[in-house]
Image: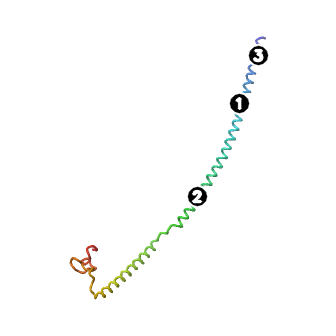
Amino acid sequence: MNKRKNELKDYKAEMVFQQVKRAMLMRGHAERMVEEAEERSRLEKEKIENAKETQKVINENKEAEEKLKKLKDEQKAKRTPLLKWDEFRNMRTTMNRHRSNYITGMRKQFNKLIKKNNGEPFAWQFCEICAEQFGNTTTLLPKVLG
């Protein structure tokens, strides 16, 4: 019987130990549950803050895109359009016509001046070395112009 009493004491001690162990585990579990709830709460707040920050960045990006589009439109309006090939050809033809009219007018004035000089050429129309009059052919052009 003593043996049974000793076993009973051992079982009671083991039961108390297991109850204490269970209470400690339950307390630890409760603490972990509280920590997990706090962590979930913190993560939820962080998620909300990140969503706000993301929206802020998206709005700033949209504003920047609008400003860029506005600047591009302003630059496009300021840009001088390039001439098209037909316009360039027409302008060149017009310029050549004006140049030939100007040269014709200058020749007429020059001929009038020669008539006023009694038909004789001016001194600057002669070569200083050979005293020959300059002309339009390559042999009668000054060396500087030839």
Residue at (76% x, 14% y) in the render = 6
Mark 3, other Cα within 10 Å: few <14 / some 14–19 / many ≥20: few
Mark 1, other Cα within 10 Å: few <14 / some 14–19 / many ≥20: few
Tell me the amino acid under the disc marked 3.
Lys
Q: Secondary structure at mark 2?
A: helix
Q: Earlier in the sequence, mark 1 or mark 3?
A: 3
Residue 86 occupies quadrant: bottom left
Give the numbered dot on residue 9.
Answer: 3
**Looking at the picture, does residue 54 appear above or below residue 139?**
above
Q: Which residue is mark 1?
A: 28
Q: Secondary structure at mark 3?
A: helix
Tell me the amino acid under the disc marked 2.
Glu
Give the numbered dot on residue 78.
Answer: none
Position of residue 108 in the picture relative to residue 88 (left or right): left
Tell me the amino acid under the disc marked 1.
Gly
The x and y percentages for residue 107 are 34, 83
Pick the front one: 131 or 145: 131
Q: Which residue is mark 2?
A: 65
Q: Earlier in the sequence, mark 2 or mark 3?
A: 3
